[in-house]
Image (cartoon, rainbow, N blue to C red):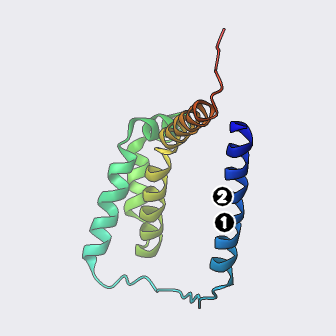
């Protein structure tokens, strides 16, 4: 009888959540998008971008990849210094993305850990036992 009550409760919860999603989905909002132009007016932006790219090129992994491809770090910095301000700004924005993507493995591991803990909690709430042999 307790299993029937739990199953009934779950069905009621699913129906309520489906109704709530229907209500939220029926509300229409206005989405606006636009392009914001990047301003490269003064030399301060160039020095900041140059410092960003230089710190990225000093990374051990990047230096090793440059050496693997047959480019010395000095040659790479000479090419970076010779870039136009627009190209340098584009390169600096790409280094931000590369640095942000380097933590993706940690994010995946944390996500998997949360998923495993959630599954264990669900099994415990259903009075199921997990046996690892």
Dot 2 corresponds to which residue?
13
Q: Mark number for residue 16?
A: 1
Q: Whole-Å distance between the Cαs marked 2 and 1?
A: 5 Å
Q: Nearer the viewer, residue 48 or 7?
A: 7
Q: Quadrant of residue 20?
A: bottom right
Q: Nearer the viewer, residue 103 or 45?
A: 103
Q: Mark number for residue 52?
A: none
Considering the numbered disc 2 on the image, is that residue within a helix, a strand or a loop? helix
Considering the numbered disc 1 on the image, is that residue within a helix, a strand or a loop? helix
Whether the residues at callouts 2 and 1 have beta carbons within 8 Å, the answer is yes
Q: Nearer the viewer, residue 115 or 77?
A: 115
Residue at 37% across / 82% down in the picture?
40
Image coordinates for residue 29, horizontal then vertical, percent: 59, 88
Residue at 69% across / 72% down in the picture?
19
Q: Going by the picture, which residue comes out furthest to the top?
A: 133
Can you say which quadrant of the picture contains the C terminus? Answer: top right
């Amino acid at each position: 009888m307790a299993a029937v009550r739990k199953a009934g409760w779950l069905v009621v919860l699913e129906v309520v959540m489906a109704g709530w999603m229907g209500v939220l989905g029926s509300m229409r909002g206005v989405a606006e998008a636009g392009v914001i132009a990047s301003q490269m007016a003064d030399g301060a932006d160039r020095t900041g971008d140059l410092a960003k790219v230089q710190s990225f090129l000093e990374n051990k992994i990047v230096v090793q990849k440059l050496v693997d491809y047959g480019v010395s770090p000095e040659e790479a910095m000479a090419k970076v210094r010779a870039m136009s301000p627009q190209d340098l700004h584009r390169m600096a924005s790409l280094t931000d993305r590369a640095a942000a993507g380097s933590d993706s493995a940690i994010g995946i591991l944390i996500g998997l850990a949360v998923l495993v803990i959630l599954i264990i909690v669900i099994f415990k709430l259903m009075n199921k036992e997990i046996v690892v042999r």
